[in-house]
Amino acid sequence: MGGASLGGMTAMHEQGGLPIPDITHIDQPYWYSEGGDMDADEFGLQRALMLEAEIERLGEENVAAFIAEPVQGAGGVVIPPSTYWPEIQRICDAHDILLIVDEVICGFGRTGNWFGSDTFNISPDIMTIAKGMSSGYMPIGGSLVAEPLAKVISEAGEFSHGYTYSGHPVACAVALENLRLLDEENIIETVKNDTGPYLQEKWHALADHPLVGEARIVGMMAALELSPDKKARAPFAAEKGTVGLRCRSTSIDNGLIMRHVGDVMIISPPLVISKAEIDILVERAARTLDQTLAGLKNDGLMVAGKGD
Ligand SMILES: *Cc1c(COP(=O)(O)O)cnc(C)c1O
């Protein structure tokens, strides 16, 4: 209930009478869909300043922490404008508010560095970690707590907390082996300096496609915003997700797993993907866009709407 309350997944909130009290949200730094006429940097700053306004509204003595993902992953690979994180960090520092960074998706190389916090130059007090920690081969997760905070907790006595499978040796052994491979085979450096830039160049080129309003990518997580009117960054008139679902089905038929978040297509390829495999990925994505566009035209769905 705590986790669902911290997140912005309204469907989960509606199911369970969430969010629980004393958790509030600010708006997301999602320039493409919410930035209007502002330039991205101005918008990023404005969204970050919402944190300061919220802290002032609540009274800083009443605010324990701010939590966010460096890049929203399952939310649609929402990469904040470059102004966003420096301002969030400044505000947390100025008001002595703990900064919790959810690295479950961004952690362990996904953004081209060990952590999303490295990519965006964030200094978290707590990080949550899971998925990439074992490359998904075994279920394992955790929270990393910075030394000064850990000291406070340990001085207060034992931190009473646990799960049935906390510290499970099999999961830990797999995670350790995964970390060894990431390190010794220079997988993260390869993503940062070689395969990542290669994919980024090809991915950005997909923005020229008539169905794509924006192509964005960091490291090896990427998104395509589908739009019937790319200049206006307009959503479709059809119910949100209609076009995304069609595109996903076509993509899977083409042998490429693209997930859809509404009408945003997202990918998260394996960090060991080769350049030859990237060529195949991008070729299949382009073919999927062509086929999806043809189908939309055929069914009269290339129509802009107001969105929700
Ligand atoms: C998957 C995911 C979670 C959930 O992690 P659990 O280990 O299942 O609690 C949390 N945050 C993000 C960003 C995720 O992608």
Image (cartoon, rainbow, N blue to C red):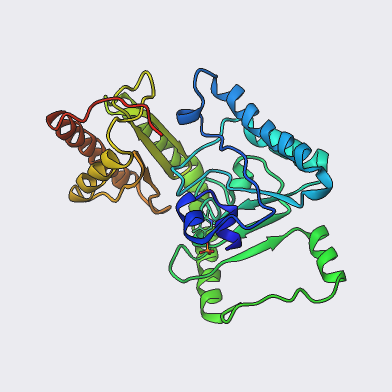
- In the displayed structure, 179 sits above or below 226; it is below
**Residue for point 61% across, 61% down:** 2
Quadrant of image for the N terminus: bottom right
Quadrant of image for the C terminus: top left
* Horizontal and vertical percent position of residue 108: 54, 55
Choose top left, top right, bottom left or bottom right for residue 294: top left
152 vs 14, left or right, is right
**Residue for point 51% across, 43% down:** 192
In this view, the residue in front, 111 or 288, is 288
In this view, the residue in front, 101 or 170, is 101
Q: Is residue 205 visible?
A: no
* Horizontal and vertical percent position of residue 144: 68, 61
53 vs 142, left or right, is right
* Horizontal and vertical percent position of residue 111: 52, 45
Q: How many marks?
A: 0
**Residue for point 70% across, 53% down:** 22
Q: Is residue 109 visible?
A: yes
- In the displayed structure, 184 sits above or below 123; it is below
In this view, the residue in front, 246 or 1, is 1
Seen from this angle, which residue lies furthest right?
Answer: 155
**Residue for point 64% across, 27% down:** 46
69 vs 286, left or right, is right
* Horizontal and vertical percent position of residue 217: 44, 37
Seen from this angle, which residue lies furthest left?
Answer: 298
- In the displayed structure, 52 sits above or below 261; it is above
- In the displayed structure, 195 sits above or below 138; it is above
Choose top left, top right, bottom left or bottom right for residue 208: top left
